[in-house]
Amino acid sequence: MLKKITFFALFATISLGLFSQRPTLELTFTAENNGVYVQLDSIKIMNRTQGGDTVLYWPDTVLSIYYVGTPEVSKGENSFQVFQNYPNPVADQTTVSLYVPEKDKVSITVTDILGRRIVNSERLLDKGKHSFRFTPGNSSLYFFTARWQGQGSSIKILQEGFHSGGTATLEYTGSEDYFPQLKAIEDIQDFSFSPGDELLYIGYANGLESGMLDAPQENQAYTFQFATNIPCPGTPTVEYEGQVYNTIQIFSQCWLKENLNVGTMIPGSQSQSNNGTIEKYCYNNEPDSCTMYGGLYQWWEMMQYTTQQGARGICPPGWHLPTDEEWKVLEGAVDSQYGIGDPVWDLYWEYRGYDAGTNLKTTSGWYYGGNGTDLFGFSGLPGGGRDGGGDFGSVGGDGGWWASTEGYDGDAWDRGLSYGSPEVGRGDDGKEGGFSVRCLRDY
């Protein structure tokens, strides 16, 4: 059975000619538990780029998305430009995208109707299309301006209704290869989709839930995994750079069970550099600390000097650095009160959830009895960290892990576990700090 959602879209043409989109995108879902078929009760599909969701109920396991439309002329693909935000006007938050012809710094300024500068940010962006999530404050009109190599591009952002109080924010959400955008102008059901949007799929079966993320460009068949707290099926261990890592399956995500420990140790007083050699810090400059807790890495070193979220970075082949959204899926999968896709995981600079932190922490090694249950085998350790000044701290009390997604004002998202909290912290910190790294297997 098929759930059919129709979108009337404006097709874009570029200087190389007219690009056409396949009229139908079919997403098919099934599930298993370590090779044994599982019958799904329902499937929720959430658009994490534009917002909105839809639900399939068994035996309906295929989502079909249809496009029809007429051409719209856009700038050439080699031109720097800011695309009109969607949705506009804005009720809560909106997505703004821009295209960078080649890697360089991009400055972004957002001003309100009175000309006051609300956001001022500069970041180094790779070639390609980059997206930002803008949350308005109390102004009815904003001007979003980006500049690259002397070129500027601006759009107007309208806010729907009047909102008193609140602070406008701009969050970097990721990058992708450039392609013409499809802009929805009519949506029969309360679910919008354009190619490049990141979708969160949540499968429900027998009181359990399993989640995965993807930005589909063509027909896809997805299999939810309901096995957990076992080695990843088919990949119990990974040998990489002379070390052997165990794996752990946590529903549809396969993680390395240990923090990454790869590279050459350098003193904490030095910054890691793009010199062709992976560099790491060991807590208090002691090699045994790396053996126990894994290495500590600055964000750029971990990423191997790209801004592409979900990049392989310093991970083994076939694995990648988890994005901010992928961390949210893990948190929802292991928390007993707040599930995958719950808005609580979007909270910023807070410890969130109910007991996800307890369920991710090891059963020993944390100060003052602040140990965890390690219910899902993630085995989060209190490896401490390195601050931007080169000082180490918090071993035994806290553990921090990078996400591969940039945050506000050039910082990057990370996750924190603490001896004093059953929850998981989400914040963004300066990339010059040093945190632990976990790798996630490619889907």
Image (cartoon, rainbow, N blue to C red):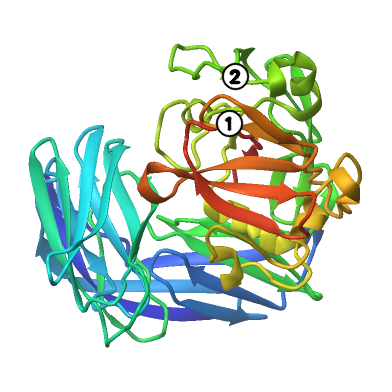
C-alpha span from label 1 to label 2 = 9 Å
User: Is 114 or 409 nearer to us in this picture?
Assistant: 114
Label 1 or label 2, whichever comes before in sequence order: 2
Question: What percent of the width, then of the height, locates residue 55?
Answer: 56, 80
Label 2, residues with CA under 10 Å away: few <14, some 14-19, many ≥20: many
Q: Which residue is mark 1?
A: 434
Callout 2 amino acid: Gly
Q: What is the quadrant of residue 359 in the picture?
A: bottom right
Whether residue 147 is visible here, answered yes or no, is: yes
Residue 309 point in image, percent of width and height: 46, 43
Task: Indicate the position of residue 25 as horizontal and vertical percent values.
Answer: 41, 65
Residue holding disc 2: 268
- Which image quarter is the N terminus in? bottom right
* x 51%, y 65%: residue: 27
Q: Nearer the viewer, residue 79 or 359?
A: 359
Q: Are marks 1 and 2 in contact (CB under 8 Å)?
A: yes
Q: Residue at image x 76%, y 56%? A: 357
343 to 392, vertically: above or below: below
